[in-house]
Image (cartoon, grey):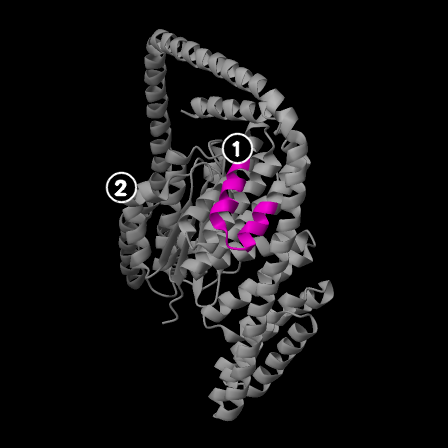
Amino acid sequence: MKKYSYIFIIMVLAVFCLLGQEKRFESKESFDDLLTIADQLKAESQYDSATTIYNFIKTRAVIEKDTFHILKANMGIASVFFYLKETAVARDYYRQMISLSKTANDSVHLNKAFYGIGGTYQLDGNLDSALYYYERTLSFFMEEDNKADEALILSNLASLYYQKGDYERAIQTSKKSTELAITLGISHLESSNLRFMGLVHRVTGNYDESQINYFDAYRIADANKLLKEKAEALFGLSKLSEDQGDFPKALKYMRNHSNVLEDMYVQGENDQILNLREKYNTAELELENERQENLALQQRKYKTITLIVSVTLVLTAFIIIYVIDQRRKNTKSLADKNDEINKQQIDELLQKQEIASLQGVLEGQETERRRVAIDLHDRLGGILSMVKLHFSVVTESLSKDDQTHAKFMKASDLLDQATSEVRSISHNLMSGVLTKFGLVPALEDLKDKISSTGKLKVNLYSNDLNEVLSAEQELQLYRIVQELISNILKHSQAKEANIQVTKGEGNVNLLVEDDGMGFDMKEVNNKAGIGLSNLKARVAKLNGNFHIDSGRGAGTTISIDIPINHD
């Protein structure tokens, strides 16, 4: 169907060319002009018209293999759905940007897509996921010294911390954004941040600071003729006065707020009148030009119709020939496809056997350690205990002055030392790498073993986790990582995977991501496979939170938060 769509597009473009309209779209600059128009329509809330232009740009850019403008169009469409609060649709377009940005090695658009996904999650109330994407994008723009985007992300992070109830962090983050806004001269962001800090201080009962912030926000908005920010600052001052019980002052600020809203309305009306006048003058000029060109167009009309019919006939014949040729090829290659399917099934079977072998190695090592430890403790330890008993009987029967008695005592001490060593070795074997050295060394060992197979490169990142989790929590978390890595080997076709274990405030976060083929979240939720159910059950046993983020061709990211048990 895509090929037929391309043919239809070619026909439409041919008509455009024949009508003499091709000059509007024959250069890269025309893409930028159309993007400017679409952005303006979006700002005016004319979302249908904006989306139509974005889709046209994307279609043409695909034909011309213009990756940059495909990304620009995708970002525009995603932002429209974001404003419409269609967050799931917006995320799909952002994920398309991620896949294309990675292919084109475009780190700027890649991180803007991450930022957009963070915004959709914040709008959905999924604050942890939003925080993850914001912080990931913030670090990139800080490295690139992109102060403008850094200031904007910090402002969003501040509102996110406010939603999470972390008011102190919200204030500090908003101050950083404000400092950057002042340096860059972004007045509307400076005023917005000050008004936000006024809100936080008001909610926390710090009325003096709140009043200072609201007044500063009003002053900057008034100086720069930012009517919307000015109205919001007055509204905040009214609510502050109301909280303080000063109702006459609250009423005064609310009246001033209404006056500013009225000014905004009047200004909007005047702008519309000016726009109408400009459109009228432009239309009059265009009408005069149209009159001058009308005679020439009439002469070209019949030639154009003839060419359109000719092109249509040629394209129709091409479609018919193409369909017949495709049917012939499909019939001829059916046997080859069957052979290829059989070969794929054999390859999948071999791959499953390799994965099962890897899992057997991981599980067999722990089983063998346990068996050897039990044999040492129960069998060899028991024999040494019996020998010790017999030595005790012999030693008691000898005189302490006898030289043989001293030798027996020396042998008895050596026997005690051997028994202690057997127990120590048994205990170490029973503990394994995990309980002896902790979770991080165990994951390091797992990483080395998986990477050494050549099937998957595994990277591990962690901070200090000493004595943070109980032994049972570490064991369960280790089993979860084993199962996630097993799933990556089985299903993702990934080349590389990252494991990140970090300590937060009151919790430990496990993040496992890969660069594989990804999957459709709706399909996974409908099927609810056994592997996913097992993972959720393990996380629920630890009273943790489980989150998956994936898309077709965009890899998979799984985030798990485990609360720290201080009991």
Mark 2 and mark 1: span between their CA atoms?
Answer: 34 Å
The residue tagged 2 is: 527
Vertical placement of residue 193 versus 114, above or below: below
Position above or below: 475 against 362? below
Direction from residue 473 to residue 159 in the image, left or right: right
Most common secondary structure along the magenta stretch: helix
Measured as percent of width and height from the top left, residue 394 is found at 29, 58
Is residue 108 in view from this perspective?
no
Counting from the top left corner in percent of width and height, residue 25 is at: 63, 32
Residue 270 visible? The answer is: yes
Nearest the camera: 183 or 553? 183
Which structural element holds mark 2? helix
Q: Residues within 10 Å of mark 2 (few under 14, many from 20)?
A: few
Query: Residue 7's x, y, as percent?
Result: 48, 21
376 or 277: nearer the viewer:
277
The range drawn in magenta is: 37-56
Q: Residue 353's image quarter?
A: top left
- Give amino acid for label 2: Lys
Residue at left offset 58%, top offset 26%: 19
Between residue 439 and residue 46, name the one nearer to us. Answer: 46
The image quadrant where one finds the C terminus is: bottom left
At x 44%, y 61%, the residue is 127
- What residue is rendered at 52% in x and 33% in y? 59
Give the residue type at disc 1. Thr
Q: Is residue 549 left or right of residue 349?
A: right
Above or below, 219 relative to 535: below
- Residue 59's mark? 1
Closer to us: 12 or 106: 12
Above/below status of 96 relative to 182: above
